[in-house]
Image: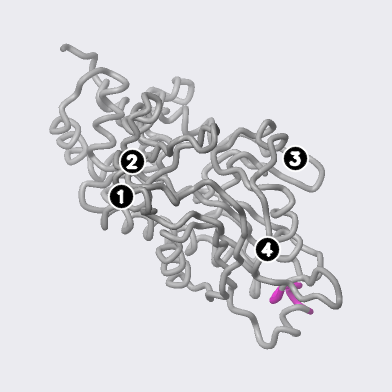
């Protein structure tokens, strides 16, 4: 197939435009093939090698990121009035959109890694966030299997009492390499976050029992203190299933316990001096009590997200407002400051 000059280059740039943390050769090759038709991975690999470090930067074995100055060079190679390359144009548009403000809330459209890298030091009093854990389950291949009801890495639970249950990702299928990538992601995030949070500021991170150890290791390695976790008690239909395709043969077996809780990991940026000194200066260092006679506890009874809330924001992991209000209130001990959510998702 004969292609116009620069087609592979432009397809690679477009593939990497939103990926500020880069992509593997296989991921880039797939993105190129999706855009301009079947393209050999060897051709993509050769182009990447020939143009590193001019256009690309190798950040790991077989893992590349486009250089920021390369995007600018491509965008204006033919003069200041020239139209930018499509990939550079996409990236520029994504970063240039203005923030949306509603009341005391500000919603920023962009990559939180880019934003954190430029955010002022000691400008945030607390962080409450529900980050993405998807590594393979949201790939085009696995999503296609899910749509066809074949599962793949997704568990399609059997109906229960006439109710159709939502598919769930099998976190247990993650390889050692997948877990390593997840750890690197959270370490990079926490390292950028550390200078932005004020001393004594708390960071609450939603997780799950199978992956929380990866997150905890990465965030503490980045410089935060581990301060326990909040247990969100919630009755779910997740887990407790009999072996797939052998329900009758092993009728008395549950492959995994039914999930009835969700961990929210607690971290804190090291305080300056005593807690009372930190509270006076930075307004942080502890949790706000529900009342003078009741301390803030680490077990909170909750419920699945209400239908009305899901209708407003159809997100696969939407958290209920009633629970979110409790923890957001708690992380500002004196009721003052800014709470940051770096992974807003549906904006809940």
| Residue at the image point whose x is 69% and y is 76% from the top | 285
Colour logic: one colour
Position of residue 178 relative to residue 77, above or below, is below
User: Residues under labels 1 and 4: Cα distance?
Assistant: 30 Å
Instruction: Point out the tag, 2 or 3, that comes first from the N-terminus.
Output: 3
Instruction: Point out the tag, 2 or 4, that comes first from the N-terminus.
Output: 2
Instruction: Point out the tag, 1 or 4, that comes first from the N-terminus.
Output: 1
User: Which stretch is magenta?
Assistant: 280-286
Q: Secondary structure at mark 4?
A: strand
| Position of residue 19 measured from the top left corner of the image (x, y, whole percent) | 40, 40
Badge 1 crowding class, 10 Å Cα cut-off, few under 14, some 14 to 19, many 20 or more, is few
Which residue is under mark 2?
Answer: 153
Q: Secondary structure at mark 1?
A: helix
| Residue at the image point whose x is 15% and y is 35% from the top | 46
Which residue is under mark 3?
Answer: 101
Instruction: Point out the tag, 1 or 3, that comes first from the N-terminus.
Output: 3
Instruction: Point out the tag, 3 or 4, that comes first from the N-terminus.
Output: 3
Instruction: Kindly check if marks 1 and 2 are in contact, taking CB atoms under 8 A apart as contact.
Output: yes
Number of the label disc, if any, that sits on residue 173: 1
For residue 170, side relative to residue 267 (left or right): left
Instruction: Point out the tag, 1 or 2, that comes first from the N-terminus.
Output: 2
Q: Residue furthest bottom?
A: 274
User: Residues under labels 2 and 4: Cα distance?
Assistant: 31 Å
Instruction: Kindly check if marks 1 and 4 are in contact, taking CB atoms under 8 A apart as contact.
Output: no
User: Residues under labels 1 and 3: Cα distance?
Assistant: 40 Å
In this rendered view, identify the residue nearer to me: 105 or 259.
Answer: 259
* Mark 1 or mark 3, whichever is nearer to me: 1
């Amino acid at each position: 197939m004969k292609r116009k000059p620069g087609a592979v280059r432009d397809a690679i740039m477009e593939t990497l435009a939103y990926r500020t943390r880069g992509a593997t050769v296989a991921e880039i090759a797939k993105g190129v093939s999706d855009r301009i038709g079947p393209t050999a991975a060897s051709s993509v690999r050769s182009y990447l090698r020939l143009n590193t470090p001019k256009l690309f930067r190798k950040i790991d074995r077989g893992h590349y990121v486009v250089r920021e100055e390369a995007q600018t060079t491509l965008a204006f190679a033919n003069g200041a009035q020239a139209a930018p390359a499509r990939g550079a144009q996409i990236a520029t548009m994504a970063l240039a959109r203005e923030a949306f403000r509603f009341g005391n809330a500000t919603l920023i459209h962009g990559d939180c890694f880019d934003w954190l890298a430029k955010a002022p030091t000691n400008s945030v009093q607390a962080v409450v966030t529900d980050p993405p854990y998807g590594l393979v389950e949201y790939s085009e291949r696995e999503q296609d299997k899910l749509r066809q009801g074949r599962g793949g890495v997704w568990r399609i639970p059997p109906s229960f009492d006439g109710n159709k249950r939502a598919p769930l990702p099998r976190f247990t299928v993650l390889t050692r390499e997948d877990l390593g990538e997840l750890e690197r992601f959270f370490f990079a995030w926490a390292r950028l976050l550390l200078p932005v949070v004020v001393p004594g500021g708390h960071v609450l991170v939603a997780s799950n029992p199978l992956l929380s150890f990866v997150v905890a290791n990465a965030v503490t390695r980045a410089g935060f203190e581990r301060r326990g976790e909040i247990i969100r008690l919630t009755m779910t239909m997740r887990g407790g299933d009999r072996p797939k395709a052998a329900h009758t043969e092993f009728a008395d077996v549950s492959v995994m316990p039914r999930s009835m809780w969700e961990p929210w990991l607690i971290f804190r940026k090291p305080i300056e001096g005593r807690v009372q000194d930190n509270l006076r200066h930075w307004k942080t260092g502890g949790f706000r009590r529900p009342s003078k006679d009741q301390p803030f506890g680490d077990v909170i009874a909750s419920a699945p997200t209400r239908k009305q809330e899901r209708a407003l924001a159809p997100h696969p992991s939407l958290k209920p407002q009633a629970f979110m209000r409790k923890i957001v209130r708690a992380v500002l001990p004196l009721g003052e400051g800014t709470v940051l959510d770096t992974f807003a998702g549906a904006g809940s």
